[in-house]
Amino acid sequence: MVKRLSEILWEENQDIAQSCLNHPFVQGIASGALEREKFNWYVGQDYFYLHAFAKAFCLATVKTPDAEGMRAFHKLAGGALGEMKLHKGFEETLAAEVEKVIPSKATRMYTDFLLATAWSSDAGLIAAATTPCNRLYAWLGQNLKGHLDDESNPYIDWILMYSSDSFEELAKETERLVDLYALDDENTRTVYRYAMICEYEFFDAAWEYSPPESEL
């Protein structure tokens, strides 16, 4: 049976996916032991990122060659905006701040890449640049939920969101668009892998974060 391009790309980047799963930041979410300040900082950074993520899908809607792609990318933009609601919810439950965010170097690296790709490339490469986020988070959420043994975990809403059937559908949809529109070439592989590297750097920056002394 011939593998789909999206399957091949995901398999080729399992090294980075495993590194993300094993990262102390992600494992801290799984155990609930992650410092609140690190998680809240991450939430703000991710909220900033999601603006670019949603815009990339909107640009893909314009560039897609057919109505099917327009509907699909429009749906994915809505999914990104819905994801932002989860982050806004953390303002109330965990005292995270999402509106007044100064993006980190890792966040800028990711958003600049994403928007540059969306502005300059076709729908296939935009799909390749955005799929790693949805697929990786769905995979992480499912892995973490499978080992969740404490419902008092302060990050349970994060785990449940990304392990949900609805988020898995978003991941499958971006993969479907890769299969429809992306070329099986080195450019697609480079874009996909760079996005995966950005995901790892995003978690790493959150793990390394320490609040200014004025906030301690």
Image (cartoon, rainbow, N blue to C red):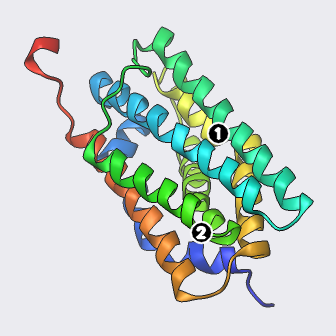
Residue 185 percent location from the top left of the image: 59, 88
Left or right: 201 in relation to 46: left
Residue 55 percent location from the top left of the image: 61, 44
Residue at left 47%, top 14%? 91
Q: Which residue occupies the foreground of this view, 87 or 166?
A: 87
Q: Quadrant of residue 194?
A: bottom left
User: Please, what secondary structure does the residue beneath circle 1 have?
Assistant: helix
Asked if residue 45 can be seen in this view, the reply is yes
Q: Amino acid at mark 2?
A: Ser
Residue at left 69%, top 80%? 5
The quadrant in which the N terminus is found is: bottom right
Q: CA distance from mark 1 to mark 2?
A: 20 Å
The quadrant in which the C terminus is found is: top left
Residue at left 73%, top 50%? 170
- In the image, residue 193 above or below residue 170: below
User: Please, what secondary structure does the residue beneath circle 2 have?
Assistant: loop
Q: Which residue occupies the foreground of this view, 11 or 107?
A: 107
Q: Amino acid at mark 1?
A: Ala
Looking at the image, is mark 1 or mark 2 nearer the viewer?
2
Residue 85 percent location from the top left of the image: 62, 24
Name the residue tied to disc 1. Answer: 80
Residue at left 69%, top 55%? 171
